[in-house]
Structure formats: C-alpha cells, structure tokens
Image (spheres, rainbow, N blue to C red):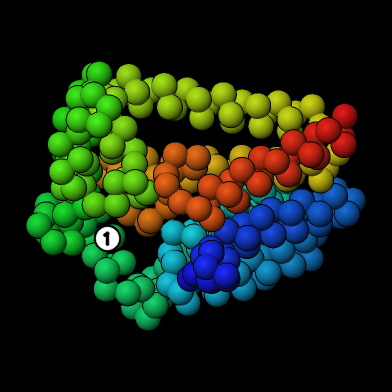
C-alpha cells in the first residue's frame, strides 16, 4: 500500500498507472494497427490483471478499478474487437460476484450496501456519505464562504482534505464554485482531445488517451461518490485533493505528455 524511503512515503500503485498507460501506448504504436488480433487484447489484459491482482491484495479497490478503467478505455479507443470487450465486461461481472464472497473486506461491503440503501446505517458505516451530502446541500448557490463551512471546519465531514474535498468546495463555494471547477476540468480535457486529434504519432495519441481516461474517471468517481451516486472507493480528485504521491504523479503525467508534444511537433 505504501513504501517509505528516507522519510518519504509514496504509493507504488501511482507508478503502476504511469507504467500501464505507457505500456499500452507502446504496444499500440508497435502493433501495426492490427488491434483486432487476440494477442493484443489478451497480452495487454493479462499484464493489467496482474497489476489489479496485486493492488487488490492491499486491498485497494479504488486503484484497482482505475487500472481496469485505464486499460479498458485505451483498448476500446484504439478499436479492439467488440467480442473481446463484451467478454471482458461479463468476466468482470463474474469476478465482482466472486470478490463479494471471497475478497472484499467488511468495510468495502458496507460501502456498497450503503450506496444501495443510503439510510441503512447513517451513524456508523453510512456516516461519511451522509455528512458529504449534507455539506453539499448546505452550500446552495454561492456557498457559506471559504473557510466557513460548518461540516468541514468543525470536522463533521471525514477526510475533508482528500476523499471528500468536493463536498468542501460544494459547501464553502456553492454550486457556483463547483461549476467553475468543472469548467476548468473541461478545459483540461478539451486540450487533451486536441492533442489526440492533431497528433500524427500513435504512441503520443494513445498515451494522451490513457491520461485523459485516468483523470476523467477519477473526477467522475470522486464527484459521484461525494454526491452519493456511486459507492465510496477512496479515489481522490485530481489536482484538488491533498496528497503527495498522487499529486506528483498527476503532474508528472502532464509533464510527460508535454514532452511528447514538444518532440512530436
């Protein structure tokens, strides 16, 4: 889960995200656009499943989901056969059922149960999502003011600086602040799409696709969990949530892409 070296700690799964994106991009650039071949699908899939298996042993369901989403989104974007993609979805559904009985921890099962029934246990296992929705609702249109959110400042809202930072923004800056943040993410994603569209290098375009998928899925998952629309998985909000290794890796991914663009153009 965490490595500590010379007083600095970091999550190795963050490096796995970079490795997976660059690995798939490299294979795509060397495969001669024959993405319908079984070797492409199963070769990249087996490596991804190995990474997911190691992450699940931590256990870290949120990061495992992100790795799977990166791989699936990238191979779908380059045009892998729909038959294989459909088979993968069915396999994931079967593995999810097996994971419920054999791999998921009790607290992870509680998160899923609370998502299905939000009022199931509002004072214990459902406390986080209950406080999150209260905070977002209290912000209304323009919020209570930066630093004046009662839910976050009085510590009713747990993990306010990481998992539930979106709720803090919603409470203190309101709907207006949330919309500004989403517009900024939209600009970032639009720039990624321009890079993908204009690039004449398969490696650059595929790597940009993987980075876009990672940031979008993180945003979608974090916001959805804060609003109670998705189960809580511990996925952070890119560039917004407090965190050393995740922030450094996100910035590194953008830097890698910028370097590719400079070389490509």
* Near-viewer residue (42 or 104): 104
Q: Residue 166, how many percent across, how many down?
A: 34, 38
Is 27 displayed left or right of 2 in the figure? right
Residue for badge 1: 111
The answer to whether residue 4 of the structure is visible from this angle is: yes
Locate residue 102 relative to residue 263 in the image: left or right.
Answer: left
Q: Residue at x 57, y 70 (%)?
A: 6
Q: Can you name the residue that lies furthest to the bottom here?
A: 102
Quadrant of the image containing the C terminus = top right
Q: Residue at x 23, y 61 (%)?
A: 113
* Residue 136 vertical placement versus 53 (above, below): above
Seen from the viewer's position, the closer of residues 69 and 1 is: 1
Locate residue 73, reporting x and y percent: 61, 48
Residue 221 visible from this viewpoint = no
Which of these two is toward me, 11 or 6?
Answer: 6
Name above or below for residue 84 compared with residue 261.
Answer: below
């Amino acid at each position: 889960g965490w490595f500590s070296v010379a007083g600095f700690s970091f999550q190795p799964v963050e490096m796995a995200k970079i490795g997976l994106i660059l690995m798939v991009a490299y294979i795509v650039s060397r495969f001669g656009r024959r993405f319908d071949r079984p070797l492409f699908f199963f070769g990249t899939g087996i490596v991804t499943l190995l990474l997911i298996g190691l992450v699940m042993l931590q256990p870290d369901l949120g990061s495992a989901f992100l790795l799977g989403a990166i791989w699936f989104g990238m191979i779908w974007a380059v045009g892998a056969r729909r038959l294989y993609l459909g088979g993968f979805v069915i396999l994931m559904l079967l593995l999810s059922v097996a994971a419920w009985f054999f791999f998921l921890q009790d607290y992870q099962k509680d998160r899923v149960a609370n998502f299905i029934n939000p009022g199931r246990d509002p004072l214990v296992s459902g406390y986080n999502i209950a406080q999150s929705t209260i905070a977002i609702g209290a912000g209304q249109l323009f919020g209570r003011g930066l630093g004046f959110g009662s839910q976050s400042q009085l510590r009713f809202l747990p993990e306010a600086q990481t998992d539930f930072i979106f709720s803090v923004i919603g409470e203190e800056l309101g709907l207006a602040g949330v919309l500004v943040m989403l517009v900024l993410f939209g600009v970032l994603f639009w720039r990624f799409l321009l890079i993908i569209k204009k690039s004449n290098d398969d490696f650059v375009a595929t790597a940009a696709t993987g980075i876009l998928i990672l940031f979008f899925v993180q945003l979608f998952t974090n916001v959805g969990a804060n609003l109670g629309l998705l189960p809580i998985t511990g996925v952070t909000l890119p560039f917004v949530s407090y965190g050393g290794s995740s922030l450094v890796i996100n910035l590194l991914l953008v830097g890698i892409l910028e370097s590719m663009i400079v070389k490509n153009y």
